Amino acid sequence: MRFLNRWLNSFKFEKGKIFLPQLLMSAESASGAFEEIKERMPKNEIDTSKKVIIATVKGDIHDIGKNIVKVLLESHGFVVYDLGKDVAPEVVVKEANEKDCD
């Protein structure tokens, strides 16, 4: 429940009811929750032919959605290369080519 409350804070931020420090604290809490969820999810065998590059685009530091997608892809056997936040498009393309992602 605590995770859900933190996640909902992102909507309060958009409406000006909370501010950046509170939003960043919520994001940190969400990251911790994702690690717990990831540990408890059933794991499929990793299929090295299913490779994905994931990143938050340049100019954006909000990665909650990216982290949700990452956990889901990993739980379905994908190899996920997470480039992090605020990543230039050229870096994503370069990494996708180097790691032979589809």
Image (cartoon, rainbow, N blue to C red):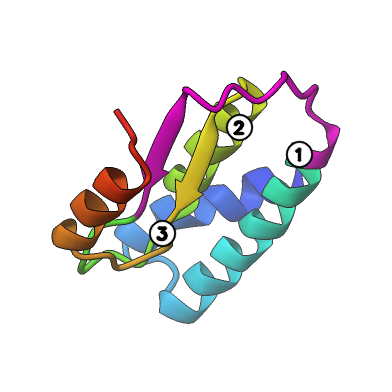
Secondary structure of the residue carrying numbered label 2: helix
List x then y, in percent, for residue 13.
Answer: 38, 62
**Numbered mark located on residue 37 in the image:** 1
Give whichever of 87, 97 is nearer the camera: 97
Eyeballing the image, is 44 above or below 74?
A: above
Q: Is 56 placed left or right of 6 in the picture?
A: left
Of label 3 and label 1, which has the lower sequence position?
A: 1
Q: Secondary structure at mark 1?
A: helix
Image quadrant where one finds the C terminus = top left
Q: Main secondary structure of the magenta part?
A: loop
On residue 74, the disc is 2
Q: Secondary structure at mark 3?
A: loop
Residue at 36% x, 53% y: name it: 55
Is tag 3's residue or tag 2's residue first in the polypeptide sequence? Answer: 2
Q: Please name the residue shown 51% across and 40% down the image.
A: 80
Q: Whole-Å distance between the Cαs marked 1 and 2?
A: 12 Å
Q: Which numbered tag is attached to residue 83?
A: 3
Amino acid found under the numbered disc labelled 2: Glu
Neighbor class of circle 2 (other Cα within 10 Å; few <14, some 14-19, many 20+) is many
Mark 1 neighbour density, 10 Å: few (under 14) some (14–19) many (20 or more) = few
